[in-house]
Amino acid sequence: MDEKRKHPRTEIEEPAYVSSGGSVMRCVVRNISIEGAAIDVENPAFVPQRFRLVMAKDCSIVHACRVAWIKKSRIGVTFVDVAQDPPK
């Protein structure tokens, strides 16, 4: 399979949180790059189209995300610049 990403992803296994509108859900970040990540969640149906990804080891690391794809319990997200791409 050809790699289509501009930036390679780094394989990791770090706990994090999906945060949106006051609700928080645990997840695991499986890989990450400067443009996005793949996360595993228990129930993708509860993940909104846009959310913040908060890293559990360092809560000061927060990424604004937009869902790019969902396959079973794995979600691919694109990091967005909130100033350039405000929520709709």
Image: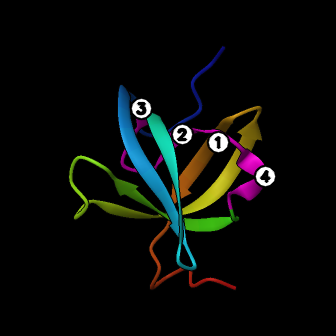
Tag 2 secondary structure: strand
Residue 2 picture location, percent across and down: 62, 19
N-terminal of the two: label 3 or label 1? 3
Report the disc number at residue 75: 1
Q: Amino acid at mark 4?
A: Ala
Instruction: Determine which of the numbered discs, if any, sits on residue 9 in the image.
Output: 3
Mark 2 crowd level (few <14, some 14–19, many ≥20, 10 Å Cα): many
- For badge 3, the amino acid type reads Arg
Circle 1: element type: strand
Q: Which mark is residue 21?
A: none
Q: CA distance from mark 4 to mark 1?
A: 11 Å
Q: CA distance from mark 2 to mark 1?
A: 5 Å
Nearest the camera: 52 or 4?
52
Residue 27 lies left or right of residue 76; in this view the side is left
- Label 1 near label 2: C-beta < 8 Å? yes
Point out the stretch of residues depicted in magenta. Answer: 31-47
Which mark sits nearer the N-terminus, 2 or 4? Answer: 2
Instruction: Give the Cα distance between marks 4 and 3.
Output: 25 Å
Q: Nearer the viewer, mark 3 or mark 1?
A: 1
Of circles 4 and 1, the one toward us is 4
Mark 3 → mark 1, Cα distance in angstroms: 14 Å
- Left or right, 50 with respect to 13, comes to right
Q: Looking at the image, which residue is at 56% across and 67% down?
A: 51
Q: Quadrant of the C terminus?
A: bottom right
| Real-space Cα separation, disc 2 to disc 3, in angstroms | 12 Å
Number of numbered discs overlaid on the protein picture: 4
Give the residue at mark 4: 45
Q: Are marks 3 and 1 in contact (CB under 8 Å)?
A: no
Q: Is residue 70 above or below residue 52?
A: above
Residue type pointed to by label 1: Ile
The quadrant holding residue 20 is bottom right
How far apart are the two marked residues, 2 and 4, measured between alpha carbons? Answer: 14 Å
